Image: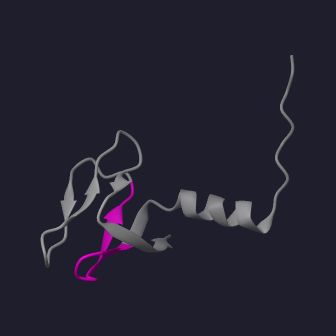
């Protein structure tokens, strides 16, 4: 059997792993700037409570960020 070698750990890969473990994200609406906390695997469409713009759409795994930008990954 062939085994793939383990990838070397670097600072960037460690930070990616930390972000991947987080289930919640703080996002900012692109239209009005309102910040909201969402579950990154949302199963329904999430709209901004201030302006009504669509922020997140379900995508079968991690939700697709449509009208927002990530502010931070929460732990």
Magenta stretch: includes residue 64: no
Locate residue 46: give its quadrant. Answer: bottom left
Highlighted magenta segment, given as a residue range: 27-40
Tell me the residue at 22%/82% (across/down): 32
- Percent position (x, y) of residue 4? 83, 32
Question: In the rendered picture of this protein, how many numbered marks are placed on residues?
Answer: 0
Locate residue 36: give its quadrant. Answer: bottom left
Location of the N terminus (image quadrant): top right
Using the image, determine if residue 62 lies above or below residue 16.
above
Using the image, determine if residue 15 lies above or below residue 61.
below
Locate residue 33: give its quadrant. Answer: bottom left
Tell me the residue at 49%/70% (across/down): 73
Colour convention: one colour
- Percent position (x, y) of residue 30? 30, 75
Tell me the residue at 31%/59% (across/down): 66
Which is more toward the observer, 51 or 60? Answer: 51
- Percent position (x, y) of residue 9? 82, 58
Instruction: State left or right for residue 2 relative to residue 17.
Output: right
Using the image, determine if residue 30 lies above or below residue 67.
below
Tell me the residue at 25%/82% (across/down): 34
């Amino acid at each position: 059997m062939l085994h793939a070698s383990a990838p070397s750990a670097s600072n960037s890969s460690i930070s990616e792993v930390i972000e991947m473990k987080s289930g919640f994200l703080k996002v900012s609406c692109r239209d009005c700037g309102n910040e909201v906390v969402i579950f990154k695997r949302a199963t329904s469409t999430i709209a901004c409570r201030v302006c009504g713009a669509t922020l997140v759409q379900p995508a079968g795994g991690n939700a697709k960020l449509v009208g927002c930008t990530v502010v931070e990954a929460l732990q």
